Amino acid sequence: MAQRGVPAAGAVDVLVVVYGGGHVQAVVPVAKALQARGVRVCVLALTTAIAVLAATDLPYFTYADLPEAAEPETQAVAARLMQDMPQNGVLPASETAAYLGLNYRDLEESLGPAAAAEAWAHGGRQHFHPRRLMRSVLSRIAPRFVLTTNSPRSEQAAIEAAGELGIASACLVDLFALHAVRWIAQPNFARRIYVLDESVKAMFLRHGRPEADIRVTGNPAFDSLHDPQVKAAAAAMRAARGWGQGGRTTLLYASTPEPKLHPYTGLPADPDLPRALERHLVAMVAADPRLELVIRRHPSEDQEIATGPRIHASPRADDVNALVQAVDLVVVTASTVGLQAYLAGTQMLSVERSVFAKDAPYGDFGMSVPVPDLPDIAPAVERLLPRLQERRTRPSEPPLRQTATEAIVEDVLGWLG
């Protein structure tokens, strides 16, 4: 089990500061690999990253472990902020109280009580930016290097505080950083930026980040895409399910739900788009014996999928990393399965009708063949068929010389000396 607690001064070489979701999945492989190389690593786990770290052997601590969290002023602020919040959240109340209390106190120190109250009333925790607190944490622990991803609030503040204290730091951009590029592209934000691919690097260059600061490493969360065992599992899946027999081209549709309104921009959306696209693909495949379709719905969607001749369903138990390599073409609106396909070297087609199309800019970044609407899919597939068939007949590509994890670890070790 992981060792929990705020480390002593000078006891840490690399301090990782990270939120949950895809962010923690990107940094945990790096932290483990550094630890295996003898580097003293500790993680400040934020919100849902806590449970992930607790299941590893990495030392970690949370806001609740900081001595400031036990101060009466912090507790009083937290109690007031939590009055109208549901009490059955995924985090223990003590963690929520520490996060809210410490961040709000920092907000008051930055803006003053009146302005902090106004900010909280209009956006809540989105206004948190605890740079003073992070400066205190880093001064207390004195790490040699700080690593975060591209989250705002605590992660951004940690990088800025490291810069103020003269501590080297790096930002691992997990996906596209379409909004975070505004601050990450600033020349003094972190010493190094690790990005997904050349298209993301080009975006940072356009925003003025010096090329010498950027390393195209990939995302460690996706390293397993290139694992020989995953590739073997993909070949076995394709053979066992009879996909591609008779020269057929196998399409995978990975759906994702569409709301009525975009949760952040408020733009109107079409909740029927996922099923409308599915019906369109089913009809298209039924009319073309050269094609077959695999349907994989998002976990939050109804899993009752009507199958038929050349229409298959991918069960939840399927390994997506293997699945995207067992098919010939992946069709998405905004699903991250599309990104997995791209990184695995499988052709992707993106239907740009989703309200989330700008949040998953596969076409804009050159990762997919983009089409504007449903009637444009069949002509695009027709144009792609020769390329897809050629890909299946050419020899398999050699394994990557270096994983994303290895590339980042090598660079961090260079900073540590």
Image: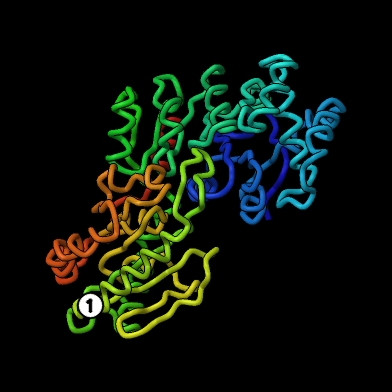
Asked where in the image residue 10 lies, by quadrant, the reply is top right
Does residue 300 show up?
yes
Question: Looking at the image, how many numbered discs can be counted on the residues?
Answer: 1
Q: Residue at x 39, y 64 (%)?
A: 254
The answer to whether residue 228 is above or below residue 161 is below
- Looking at the image, residue 301 sits to the left or right of residue 224; the answer is right
| x, y percent for residue 203 | 31, 33
Quarter containing the N terminus: bottom right
Asked where in the image residue 234 lies, by quadrant, the reply is bottom left
Considering every residue shown, the one lying at the far top of the view is 112
Q: Residue at x 57, y 35 (%)?
A: 15
- Looking at the image, residue 286 sits to the left or right of residue 247; the answer is right
Q: Which residue is the site of mark 1? A: 287
- Looking at the image, residue 266 sits to the left or right of residue 214; the answer is right
| x, y percent for residue 76 | 85, 29
299 and 54: which is toward the camera? 299
| x, y percent for residue 360 | 38, 47
Does residue 405 show up?
no
| x, y percent for residue 101 | 76, 31
Q: Residue at x 61, y 40 (%)?
A: 42
The answer to whether residue 383 is above or below residue 266 is below
Is disc 1 placed on a helix, strand or loop? loop
416 and 126: which is toward the camera? 126
Task: Give the colour scheme of this rendering.
Answer: rainbow
Quarter containing the C terminus: top left
Q: Which three-letter amino acid code belongs to the residue tagged 1?
A: Ala
Crowding near the residue tagged with mark 1, few <14, some 14–19, many ≥20 C-alpha atoms within 10 Å: few
Q: Residue at x 32, y 22 (%)?
A: 208
- Looking at the image, residue 408 sits to the left or right of residue 101; the answer is left
Asked where in the image residue 244 lies, by quadrant, the reply is bottom left
